[in-house]
Image (cartoon, rainbow, N blue to C red):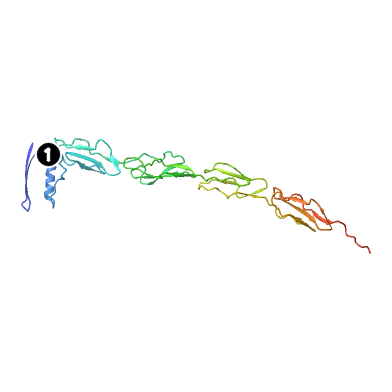
Amino acid sequence: FFSLSLSLSLSLSLSLSLSLSLSSLSSLSSLALHLALSLLSPLPLYPPPYLSLSVMACGMPIPPVNGSIDFTLGARAMYRCNPGFRLANPLAVSVVCQESGRWSSNEATPRCIPVTCPDIGHSAVDHGRWRLIYGSPSQYDAMMMLICDPGYYYKGQRVIRCQANSTWDYPEPRPACEIISCGDLGTPPNGNKIGTLTVFGATAIFSCNTGYTLVGSRVRECMSNGLWSGSQVQCLAGHCGTPEPIVNGQIIGENYNYRGSVVYQCNPGFRLIGVSVRICEQDHRWSGRTPVCVRKYPEIVAMI
């Protein structure tokens, strides 16, 4: 054992006498350094109240890079890592200053390594994938966004973050990509529809009953924006248009729709040649040919 008697004087006639018995030169030098710093400081520099003399005897442990040391009551030093880092060896959390003047662990200062989360960049998400939008892949505080395939939309929390405990802040239920629905189109009056699906990629084919004309898009498809392509379908009654007029006669009837009919009549003194009744057919044409009106008796030309 060594016995130390240290006497120091300042301009203010400050003196200090200290006598200690130490078990090692390393402990002696650590304590002497602290005393020297306290005398050179403009203000008195005292050891923190939670540092016992036994801790000072073991010397100040070196804090890890990207970390720090916390001292608890007694002779224990706790290693901590900064946010985003964790101890490489979870068992090397603390050391204790022993009576021998040495710390309980002879190993090197613990290392603080970056926090990482499981790689989800290629994780299976039906009809979707994760894309990095902030930070480094799988590193602490990194942010990933769920991108869904065309025709699908995300459901739930779209953005997740790598937390300090090496896990992603997944909500429950997990985010998912669901197929887009365009809604039911319905069957038009006097018409028909082929196709019952209403989701992305589905197709609907329309037709009209006999005598009705389809107005709009005959084929419509559910698009990735949730809308049906084309325009709304209507089935309108067939229309044949105004029938051709007849010379020296007239047309009776104004029903020009499908299955409607008109009657041709000749003026007095004329007779009808052809069919007098014409019907509006499915192809929007009048049946038969336009009749003609001719004089009943040929004109007698006087012979001179």
Q: Is residue 73 above or below residue 298?
A: above
x, y percent for residue 211: 68, 47
Q: Is residue 95 left or right of residue 145?
A: left
Horizontal side, residue 93 vs residue 35: left or right:
right
Say which residue appears at 62% left-offset and 45% top-offset.
191
Callout 1: 10 Å neighbours few (<14), some, many (20+)? Answer: few
x, y (%) of residue 76?
19, 38
**Quarter of the C terminus within the rendering:** bottom right
Q: Is residue 206 left or right of residue 47?
A: right
Identity of the residue drawn at 22% across and 38% down: 94
Q: Residue furthest bottom?
A: 304
Mark 1 — residue? 25
Residue placed at 77% from the left, 51% from the top? 277
Q: What amino acid type should be assigned to the residue bearing mark 1?
A: Leu
Q: Is residue 79 visible?
A: yes
Foreground pick, 175 / 292: 292
Q: Residue furthest right?
A: 304
- The answer to whether residue 7 shows anywhere in this view is no
Q: Position of residue 43 (x, y in %)?
A: 13, 52
Query: Which residue is drawn at the image coordinates 13% and 45% (left, top)?
Result: 34
Count of marks, rendered view: 1
> Which image quadrant is residue 142 in?
top left
Q: Using the rendered view, name the quadrant where residue 168 is placed.
A: top left
| Of 2 and 75, the residue lying toward us | 75
Q: Which corner quadrant holds the N terminus?
A: top left
Instruction: Locate residue 90, reporting x and y percent.
Output: 27, 36
Dot 1 falls on a residue whose secondary structure is: helix
User: In the picture shown, does residue 290 fall above or below 82?
Assistant: below
